[in-house]
Amino acid sequence: MREKPKVLLIIPCFNEAGSIAALLQEIKTGCPEYETVVIDDGSRDNTYAIAKTLSPTVRLLKNLGIGGAVQTGIKYAAQHDFDFCAQIDGDGQHPPEEVKKLLAAWQEKPRSILIGSRYIAHDTFRSTWTRRLGSQIISTALNRLFGQCRVSDPTSGMRLMDREAIALFAAHYPHDFPEPISLAWALRSGLSAGEVPVKMRAREHGQSSIIGWKPIAYMFRVLSYIILARLSRSSLQ
Amino acid sequence: MNETSLETTVLILLFAAWYLVLMARKTARRQIDLYDLAMLSTVAVIPAFFVLFPDTTLAITQITGVAFPFVILFGALLAVLFLFMHRLTIKLHRLESDNRMLIQELSILRQSQQQD
């Protein structure tokens, strides 16, 4: 580990032309010590044109979904020898300064994955009851099936990964429901995980794809994947 | 099973021969592999077996407890179809995964070339 670790912020984007410039400017001003890579997941708007003027930007030749986009960023981190990478959303919901909390928590107690939790502090984030219920059930399943960690927000997209997690996820990363399932895969592979309370902002542009009753269907599918991960014999490493 | 007429037997055997030749040509041209040939050929081989060996077919129906031999025939074909589908699903999943990996690697490579 270097004295001053190399940290990469992975910013997966899909049609985020309205928010990406502001986010990248915010990172340049508030966190100049971090490097960034924008993964444009085949946007149909100007996301790529805007992002590439402010940050290294990988434009995926075809839309791969959030899992494929994040894994591309993780591969980029592995190829460029980063000590840590943090995933933050391109819609501006994740304040980049919050990554400092994740790094501070890692320095206090190293864990392969540190999740920025919206639910520990209870005062910064509001979501629909179906989303909260789905997230609660998924976290209960993870905590019961993988006893070595306690998580309250397994679906959070803000997370810090160290070299071990980067190596694992560069090779194996789920493409459906990546956040909770990648956590299950990591725990099954013997990696450690923890949580840090972070503040998140309300989405300024666009709309979440998980709305209405979708969180319930999402929950059942994720639960099946988590149970399968627990039942799998060998680790992925 | 003795009621299978000569015409029916000839018709099924002709179909089987034509189909097997067709599949063999496709294999020779590398349009399908040997495993596909074996799987797809069952469409011809199983009915041919049923008309060529009626006593064996009758014995199988008695062992399995079904009244009509064609139930066995369709059951066997369905089992082969599922096996084939199983293999195709695995193959498709692997291709999808390889395709995704290639897109990722190519996109990163293109970015690094543009940066240089």
Image (spheres, coloured by chain):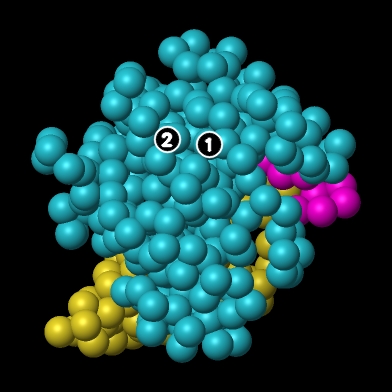
Chain colours: A cyan, B yellow
Residue at screen point 39% across, 48% down: A86
Q: Is residue B57 above or below residue B104?
A: above
User: Amino acid under label 1?
Assistant: Gly
Classify residue B8 as left or right of residue B13.
right
| Residue pointed to by mark 1 | A116
Residue at screen point 72% across, 53% down: A202
Q: Residues within 10 Å of mark 2 (few under 14, many from 20)?
A: many
User: Amino acid under label 2?
Assistant: Leu
Q: Nearer the viewer, residue B39 or A232?
A: A232
Q: Residues within 10 Å of mark 1 (few under 14, many from 20)?
A: many
Residue at screen point 61% across, 40% down: A199
Using the rendered view, name the quadrant where residue A139 is placed.
Answer: top right
Residue at screen point 33% across, 48% down: A85
Classify residue B116 as left or right of residue A86.
left
| Residue pointed to by mark 2 | A102
Q: Quadrant of the C terminus of chain B?
A: bottom left
Please say whether residue B15 is one of the residues in the magenta stretch.
Answer: no
Looking at the rendered structure, whether the residues under marks 1 and 2 are on a common chain is answered as yes
Numbered range of the magenta stretch = A210-221
Q: Earlier along the polypeptide chain: callout 1 or callout 2?
A: 2
Please say whether residue A213 is one of the residues in the magenta stretch.
Answer: yes
Q: Nearer the viewer, residue A24 or A151?
A: A24
